[in-house]
Image (cartoon, grey):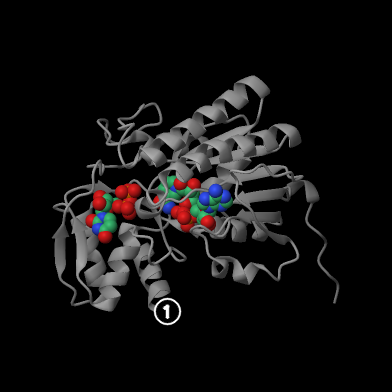
Amino acid sequence: MVASAPADASLLPMSHISLVTGGAGFIGSHLCEKLLDQGDHVICVDNFFTGRRKNIQHLLENRSFELIRHDITDPIKLEVDRIYNMACPASPVHYQFNPIKTMKTSVLGTMNLLGLAKRTGARLLQASTSEVYGDPEVHPQPESYRGNVNPIGIRACYDEGKRAAETLCFDYHRMHDVDIRVIRIFNTYGPRMDPADGRVVSNFIVQALKGEDITIYGDGTQTRSFCYVDDLVNGILSFMRAEDETGPLNLGNDGEFTVQQLAEEVVRLTGSESRIVYQPLPQDDPTRRKPDLSLARKVINYEISVPLKEGLKKTIEYFRHL
Ligand code: NAD
Ligand code: UDP
């Protein structure tokens, strides 16, 4: 049999040596997988604070995948041409566990990676967050909104750390011409979330599957916009490919739901007999959140393909088999 002719190389996406920090975490592991699929060589760096080896176990045999246990608050010398800085604990329980370390990860860690980008000429994507908008007074939140963050509250180590990291990205860009892509990720969920990390989607699903009480903090009227991880990762890859863009760029899903609606949907989809109970609302918990995705739609033709119900079903299946 005659092998089919190779495709025109100029039409194939160029492969890169990609560094993914936080690559053993929830989003990072999906990103590593997709980068390998598109032909990149992937170096995953993680200190395993919240990341887990089993998230990347299936990649360890791949000759294009390398794993380095390293903490990004210390500099690292590597030769790469793409950097995805995903390293940072993301759930309130984990980022408040050692708030000073969280701030160091965002500030020192991002500075180290920007230094690496400056030396190598690599393009760097910074995983920022909707938390830079704090408890927003503008709804939905466009990138031009400067936010309403309490700088001395219990969420500040994360919010202000991520804001400072954005500042560093833009200063390295202006001073040293570092090629940056800053994304602001809105609540993302899916398989490989740590069942014990305290975020709302994983908490509700685990509680429902175990028949335990479903814990709504506050009265459940606060809103979030939940994005399935595949949609987010597709957005990340598209933005990294875009030329002459820096962001910040919102990425997420603009369907908005109350936490009460989420709890009821999880109960419905799992067929659980769990009761919904109400507990005190943590300090500075944002009352509503929804991304304005106009810029993402314009710049990268961003599309959402997984509605909440479908994404929840896939995530429930994952947790059911754990
Ligand atoms: P995660 O906790 O699963 O992943 C974070 C990863 O970073 C883990 O593997 C952890 O071990 C690693 N890490 C933490 N500190 C490190 C350090 N100092 N050095 C090296 N590795 C370190 O969380 P996630 O949800 O996958 O989040 C990934 C990124 O996306 C984070 O930067 C987070 O702030 C951002 N983000 C996530 C969401 C979301 O809804 N999931 C929303 C906004 C922003
Ligand atoms: N939340 C809740 N029950 C839980 C966990 C979280 O009601 O068991 C609420 C939380 O107070 C917040 C929302 O769900 O209003 C989203 O919380 P999460 O920690 O997932 O993300 P973030 O607050 O950072 O958006």
Q: Residue 85 in the image: x percent, y percent?
A: 57, 45
Q: Residue 31 in the image: x percent, y percent?
A: 57, 55
What is the quadrant of the N terminus in the image?
A: bottom right
- The residue that appears at 77% across and 44% down in the rendered structure is 79
Q: What is the number of callouts on the image?
A: 1
Residue nearest the observer in this picture, 40 or 87: 87
Q: Is residue 81 left or right of residue 112?
A: right
- The residue that appears at 61% across and 70% down in the rendered structure is 57
Q: Is residue 11 visible?
A: yes
Q: Quadrant of residue 204?
A: bottom left
Secondary structure of the residue carrying tag 1 is: loop
Q: Is residue 232 visible?
A: no
- The residue that appears at 41% across and 31% down in the rendered structure is 143
Q: Quadrant of residue 284?
A: top left
Question: Residue 53, relative to residue 143: is it above or below?
Answer: below
Q: Residue 65 in the image: x percent, y percent?
A: 70, 61
The answer to whether mark 1 is within 8 Å of ligand 1 is no
Residue farthest to the right?
Answer: 2
Q: Is residue 281 left or right of residue 129?
A: left
- The residue that appears at 51% across and 47% down in the rendered structure is 235
Residue nearest the observer in this picture, 8 or 88: 88
Residue nearest the observer in this picture, 296 or 27: 27
Question: Residue 260, relative to residue 164: is it above or below?
Answer: below
Question: Residue 131, relative to residue 215: is it above or below?
Answer: above
Residue farthest to the top?
Answer: 175
Q: Amino acid at mark 1?
A: His
The crowding category of the residue bearing disc 1, from other C-alpha atoms within 10 Å (few below 14, some 14 to 19, many at least 20), is few
Q: Quadrant of residue 275?
A: bottom left
Residue hosting label 1: 321
Question: Residue 20, relative to residue 110: is it above or below?
Answer: below
Q: Residue 179 in the image: x percent, y percent?
A: 64, 31
What is the quadrant of the C terminus in the image?
A: bottom left
